[in-house]
Image (cartoon, helix red, strand yellow):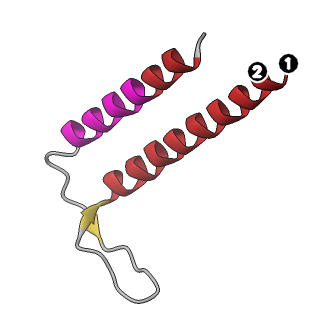
């Protein structure tokens, strides 16, 4: 699978996960604030916080793996 195909698949997959996350959280009543060191956020649904962190981890992991695959292909 080429680098371009993997990138397009990663973007499409994570975008579809984000759309499903937003649609699924339309009527969520439980909301909390995330405390940072200085400030805290607005009230966000708990599922959105977990889902957004999962999706951001998925994006980071897929792009890191693409970087390592690209280096491996260039060296061989």
Residue at mark 2 = 73
Main SS type for the magenta part?
helix
Classify 67 as above or below 13.
below
Q: Secondary structure at mark 1?
A: loop
- Per the rendered image, the range of residues in magenta is 11-24
- The quadrant of the rendering that contains the N terminus is top right
The x, y position of residue 27, in whole percent, is 14, 48
- The quadrant of the rendering that contains the C terminus is top right
Going by the image, does 22 lie left or right of 60? left
Look at the numbered discs 2 and 1 and tell me whether their residues touch, using CB distance below 8 Å.
yes
The x, y position of residue 17, in whole percent, is 35, 32
Of all residues, the one furthest to the top in this rendering is 1
Classify 16 as above or below 63.
above
Mark sitting on residue 54? none
Residue 13 in magenta stretch: yes
For residue 46, what is the image quadrant?
bottom left
Going by the image, does 68 lie left or right of 22? right
Classify 20 as above or below 3.
below
Residue nearest the observer in this picture, 8 or 22: 8
For residue 73, what is the image quadrant?
top right
Which residue shows up at 32% across the image and 52% down it? 48
Q: Secondary structure at mark 2?
A: helix
Residue at mark 1 = 76
Which residue shows up at 63% across the image and 40% down it? 64
């Amino acid at each position: 699978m080429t680098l371009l195909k993997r990138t397009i698949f990663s973007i499409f997959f994570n975008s579809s996960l984000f759309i499903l996350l937003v649609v699924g959280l339309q009527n969520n009543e439980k909301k909390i604030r995330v405390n940072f060191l200085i400030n805290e956020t607005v009230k966000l649904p708990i599922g959105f916080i977990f889902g957004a962190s999962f999706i951001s981890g998925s994006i980071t992991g897929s792009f890191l793996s693409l970087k390592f695959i690209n280096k491996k292909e260039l060296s061989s």
